[in-house]
Image: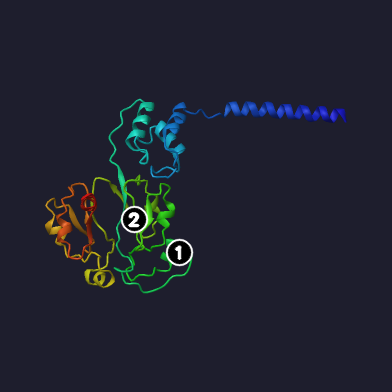
């Protein structure tokens, strides 16, 4: 019995020594900057930076594989802290926000079916949706569930509404939308063509009161020549040169184009 115990003890000791040697030999050195960077990141793990979480982003920054301003949630303040840790200068970051490019609520869009199933946009999308426009918002709030910042909510009309003050531009809502009607754009850009239908004008007119009918009035009116026709059926804005003048808003015959700047001015007055 005693010899068995001694033998077992020696075996455990040998295995322990071998594990210690192996741990030392195969130890992966961790850059101390990684821990420092993690400590200043928001910890939201939203994936807006393109990495699976804050820890992965911190490692990428420490290895020079990501910019110090890669955290869209943290913005300029976090970028400056990370830059200080890395010993480099932080370039200015343009804040971003999510924009829902659809106004196809039940009043504007033609509804042709009812749905009684899982409250998930992907499930409804797989069935084709309930509205005649196959590009319209499905209205089940998968984008709302994906937002960890409480920055998007379902409006009373069934279309998600973005709180531009809370939105960090992380992109989680855009990834959650199976129809791709949510995009992340610079927060300074306030004029948007709120439609993503590629149907021809006459078809869009039948399907939705406020869908883009490809009349090109906005294209002709834009002083900056920044509006173009995508696939010939949908007007889009190249935000690079858009100065928020709002002329296109006044020219659109079906009220597809909206200006958040004008809304803010109206609310202030």
**Residue at 22% of width from left, 72% of height from top?**
202
**Closer to viewer: mark 2 or mark 1:** 2
Res 3 → quadrant? top right
Q: CA distance from mark 2 to mark 1?
A: 21 Å
Q: Position of residue 89 (x, y in %)?
A: 30, 28
Q: Position of residue 206 (x, y in %)?
A: 26, 73
Looking at the image, the residue that sits furthest to the right is 1
Looking at the image, the residue that sits furthest to the front is 269
Side (left or right) of 182 relative to 34: left
Q: Nearer the viewer, residue 168 or 87?
A: 168
Q: Earlier in the sequence, mark 2 or mark 1?
A: 1
Q: Position of residue 239 (x, y in %)?
A: 22, 49
Disc number for residue 19: none
Q: Determine the secondary structure under disc 2.
A: strand
Q: Nearer the viewer, residue 134 or 260?
A: 260
**Residue at 42% of width from left, 45% of height from top?**
47
Question: In the rendered image, which residue does mark 2 sit on?
Answer: 161
Q: Is residue 265 above or below residue 75?
A: below
Disc number for residue 123: 1
Q: Determine the secondary structure under disc 1.
A: helix
Evaluate if marks 2 and 1 touch, with contact meaning CB atoms under 8 Å apart.
no
Q: Position of residue 71 (x, y in %)?
A: 37, 39
Q: Nearer the viewer, residue 148 or 72?
A: 148
**Residue at 38% of width from left, 57% of height from top?**
177
Looking at the rendered image, the quarter that the N terminus falls into is top right
**Residue at 73% of width from left, 26% of height from top?**
13
């Amino acid at each position: 019995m005693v010899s068995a115990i001694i033998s077992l003890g020696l075996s455990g000791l040998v295995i322990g020594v071998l594990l210690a040697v192996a741990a030392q030999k195969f130890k992966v050195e961790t850059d101390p900057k990684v821990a420092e960077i993690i400590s200043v990141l928001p910890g939201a793990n939203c994936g807006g930076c393109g990495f699976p979480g804050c820890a992965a982003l911190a490692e990428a920054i420490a290895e020079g594989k990501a910019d110090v301003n890669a955290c869209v949630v943290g913005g300029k303040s976090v970028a400056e802290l990370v830059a200080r840790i890395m010993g480099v200068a932080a370039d200015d970051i343009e804040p971003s926000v999510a924009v829902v490019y659809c106004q196809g609520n039940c009043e504007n869009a033609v509804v042709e079916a009812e749905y009684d199933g899982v409250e998930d946009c992907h499930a409804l999308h797989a069935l084709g949706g309930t509205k005649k426009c196959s590009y319209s918002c499905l209205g089940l709030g998968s984008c709302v569930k994906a937002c960890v910042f409480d920055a998007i909510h379902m409006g009373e009309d069934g279309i998600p509404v973005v709180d531009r003050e809370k939105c960090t531009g992380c992109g989680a809502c855009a990834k959650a939308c199976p129809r791709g009607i949510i995009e992340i754009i610079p927060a300074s850009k306030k004029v948007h063509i709120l439609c993503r239908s590629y149907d021809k004008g006459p078809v869009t007119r039948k399907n939705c009161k406020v869908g883009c009918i490809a009349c090109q009035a906005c294209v002709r009116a834009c002083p900056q020549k920044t509006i173009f026709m995508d696939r010939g059926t949908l007007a889009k804005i190249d935000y690079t040169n858009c100065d928020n003048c709002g002329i296109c808003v006044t020219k659109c015959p079906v009220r597809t184009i909206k200006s958040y700047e004008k809304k803010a001015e109206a609310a202030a007055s």
